[in-house]
Image: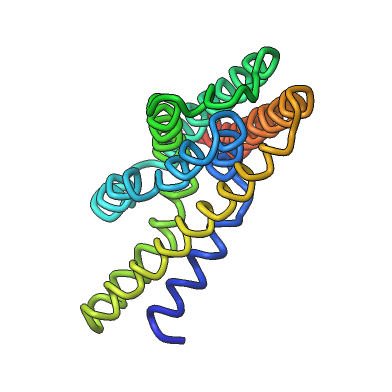
Amino acid sequence: MDALGLGLSLGLAASISPGPLLVLVVTSALRSGRRAGVLAACAPLLSDAAVVGVTLLLLGRLPERALGVLGVVGALFVVWSGVRTVREARTASLEPGASESTAAPGVAALRRAVLVNLLSPHPWVAWATALGPLTVTTWRASTGAGVALLVGFYATLVGGKVVIALVVARGRRHLGDAGYRRALTFAGVLLGLAGVALGVEFAPTLFGG
């Protein structure tokens, strides 16, 4: 498989993999509509610059416990986002224009998604163990191939999540306020559970020595 095809395949798989960022994209689209969902889906374009740079330079030298700390902090943030979503669902409304009257909901969704991606250890681990070495090897063999790999990866990583956000945002239009509140509550619960799972996965490294 050529570098572009490999990047497209890896990005597509990552775009639909369950995790805090995917749930947050769905939650943002439900809560604030298409703009917020799409902006949340674009978070890796901002956060991964730091993830990739720091990972390739430093992460291999850090102790495993550092990943545990990052994971627990990320888990707490994700749980907090889920609780906040459930609380907001109690009074949420689908009044025409109420959710997208200003740019603030979209900007807030993007900021929250960037934080989730930065605090989640999964991108760091993926770049430290697989994507980083693959990218470096491909780049050394051919600069063009390295660029194609990265472009393909982020095209489908972000594109897949954008499609999901658009589908969810379109579906919310067919909900009444009661159905909207139930869907938003369910999404908030899923977000909280994703945070708990993240904490369970990485907390043991804090005490494993």
**Where in the figure is residue 82, as x and y percent of width and height?**
62, 25
**Where in the figure is residue 11, as x and y percent of width and height?**
48, 64
Based on the displayed image, in which of its 4 quarters is residue 171 positioned? top right
Residue in view at x 62 percent, y 34 percent:
30
197 sits to left or right of 113 = right
Residue in view at x 32 percent, y 75 percent:
148
26 sits to left or right of 7 = right
Q: Nearer the viewer, residue 114 or 39?
A: 39
How are the residues colored? rainbow
194 sits to left or right of 56 = right
Number of numbered discs overlaid on the protein picture? 0
Residue in view at x 52 percent, y 29 percent:
72
84 lies above or below 202:
above
8 lies above or below 168:
below
Based on the displayed image, in which of its 4 quarters is residue 198 positioned? top right
**Where in the figure is residue 195, as x and y percent of width and height?**
61, 31
Residue in view at x 55 percent, y 35 percent:
33
**Where in the figure is residue 114, as x and y percent of width and height?**
39, 37
Based on the displayed image, in which of its 4 quarters is residue 133 positioned? bottom left
**Residue that sits furthest to the bottom in the current view:** 1
Q: Nearer the viewer, residue 110 or 66?
A: 110
95 lies above or below 140:
above
126 lies above or below 63:
below
**Residue that sits furthest to the front in the current view:** 96
144 sits to left or right of 12 = left
